[in-house]
Every structure is written in structure tokens, then in C-alpha cells.
Image (cartoon, rainbow, N blue to C red):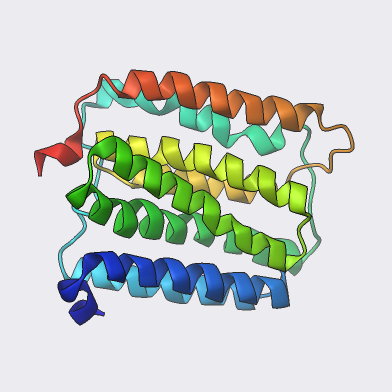
């Protein structure tokens, strides 16, 4: 893995994207969200990625470090935590029962960690080396959204998958922008993991009004937040 990284960081990132999208997508299609196979597979990826980053002292590069800002500015992240609660706007319930719910929650928490390291860490950082920041942010966000196409092969409806792709692109834009400006990936990891975990406690919605409100709020917040973040100095530009 280190040889591939040294030879081409771009291919290193793309291999991670492919392994995750195809490998985890296939496992999810075969085992679903309630099998211990899914958290086990994600845990393996998480451990491998973390060991690689720490053993090569790349924590600062890939954002596994504290936010480089003043404590008084932590309200900087408030819009992310507003979006984080969206899956619970229609009520709280259990998607499964017993250990099935436990496995689903663990799986979703690990998804947030692994996806942030791959898409916001490995992929975005190499894109930022050879592209202007807006281009790197856009490509990273679109790639993250496109990765959700694999949901078509895991039993999800076409329209539902399309909505997930658009939503993922918008969320990907926000998270990438926050990482670029703050220099830390932890806030994105926490928010992403909780968004996914809360999806396993969302009440089924026959009336899509709340879902549409959530998606609309996400787009509006992304636009406003993007304008605000655009005025902040970028921590990653200092390296």
C-alpha cells in the first residue's frame, strides 16, 4: 500500500474508492444492514486506513487532528449539526429489533468514518494538489454522490437512489468545504456517522413532506454555509 501511495497518490485514492464502493456495496447487497458481516468488513477497512495514516505520520494531512481554530468559533459547525438531525424530523423509532438494530447502528457509524477518510481524506487531498480548491471540492463531492449508485444493486428503488445521490453530493460539498477550511476531519466524521446512525431510528414516512423539507433545507443550508465558509481562511492552504 505504501508503494502505491508513493508511486501515485491519485491511484492510491481511486483504489480505495473502488474497493469501498464495489466491495462494501456487494456485501451490503448480499447481507443487508443487519448482519455482523457488514460492521466486520467496515472495521477492517477502518483499521487498515487508520494504521496507514498513523504509521506514516499523515494525521495532519488527512485531518485526523484537532480543528485548527479558536474555541470561541465552534459555532462555525452549527449548520452541520442541524442537518445531522434531519432523519429524526418525522419521529423516532427502531428500524429493526434486538441485535439486528445493534449491527445496523455499528455499521452506520463505521460507514461515516470510512467514507470520510476515503472521500474527504485520500481523494480530496490528492485532488487539491493539482486543482484549484473549488474544482477539487466539486469533484470530491460528485464522486462521493456517484458512489451511491451501488445502492441500485442492493435493492433500493431507482428514484430513492437518485435522491440519495443528489443528497450525498450536497452533503459531500459541505463536508469537503468544512475540512478544507478547518483542517480537521473529525467534525465531518462525527456528523456523517450520526446522520447515518439516525437513519436507523427514523420512522417510516408515507407522507414525503418532511423528507422534502429536509432535502430542501440541506440545499439551502449548503448554499448559505458555502458563502459563509468562502470568507474564512483555509487551513489546508497553509501546508
**What residue sits 68% from the left and 38% below the top?**
87
Residue 175 locus on image (x, y percent): 41, 40
- Image quarter where the N terminus lies is bottom left
Location of residue 124 with respect to 68 vertically, above or below: below
Give the residue at the far left of this rendering. 239
Residue 76 falls in image quadrant: top left
- Residue 214: image x %, image y %? 67, 29
Which residue is found at the position 72% from the left and 67% from the top?
Answer: 154
Position of 19 with respect to 130 (left or right) is: right
* 147 horizontally vs 158: left or right: left
Task: Indicate whether 202 appears above or below 72.
Answer: below
Does 153 appear above or below 220? below
Of residues 145 and 221, the one nearer the viewer is: 145
Quadrant in the picture for the C terminus: top left
Regarding residue 228, the answer to whether it shows in the image is: yes
State whether residue 64 appears in this view.
Answer: no
Relative to 223, residue 36 above or below = below
Q: Residue at x 17, y 75 (%)?
A: 7
Residue furthest toward the right?
A: 206
Residue 199, percent across and down? 68, 47
Residue at 28% of width from left, 72% of height from top? 51
| Quarter assignment of residue 37 | bottom right
Location of residue 145 in the rendering, given as x and y in whole percent from the top left corner: 53, 49
Amino acid at each position: 500500500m505504501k508503494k502505491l501511495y508513493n508511486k501515485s497518490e491519485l491511484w492510491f485514492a481511486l483504489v480505495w474508492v473502488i474497493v469501498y464502493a464495489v466491495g462494501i456495496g456487494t456485501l451490503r447487497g448480499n447481507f443487508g444492514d443487519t448482519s455482523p458481516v457488514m460492521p466486520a468488513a467496515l472495521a477492517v477497512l477502518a483499521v487498515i486506513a487508520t494504521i496507514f495514516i498513523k504509521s506514516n505520520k499523515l494525521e495532519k494531512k488527512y485531518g485526523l487532528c484537532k480543528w485548527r481554530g479558536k474555541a470561541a468559533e465552534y459555532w462555525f459547525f452549527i449548520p452541520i449539526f442541524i442537518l445531522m438531525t434531519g432523519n429524526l424530523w418525522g419521529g423516532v423509532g427502531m428500524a429493526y429489533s434486538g441485535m439486528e438494530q445493534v449491527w445496523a447502528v455499528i455499521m452506520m457509524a463505521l460507514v461515516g468514518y470510512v467514507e470520510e477518510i476515503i472521500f474527504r481524506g485520500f481523494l480530496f487531498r490528492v485532488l487539491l494538489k493539482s486543482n484549484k480548491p473549488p474544482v477539487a471540492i466539486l469533484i470530491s463531492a460528485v464522486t462521493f454522490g456517484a458512489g451511491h449508485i451501488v445502492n441500485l444493486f442492493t435493492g433500493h428503488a431507482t428514484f430513492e437512489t437518485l435522491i440519495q445521490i443528489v443528497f450525498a453530493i450536497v452533503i459531500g460539498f459541505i463536508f469537503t468545504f468544512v475540512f478544507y477550511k478547518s483542517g480537521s476531519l473529525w467534525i465531518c466524521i462525527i456528523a456523517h456517522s450520526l446522520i447515518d446512525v439516525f437513519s436507523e431510528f427514523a420512522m417510516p414516512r408515507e407522507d414525503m413532506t418532511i423528507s422534502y423539507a429536509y432535502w430542501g433545507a440541506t440545499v439551502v443550508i449548503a448554499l448559505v454555509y458555502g458563502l459563509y465558509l468562502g470568507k474564512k481562511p483555509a487551513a489546508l492552504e497553509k501546508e
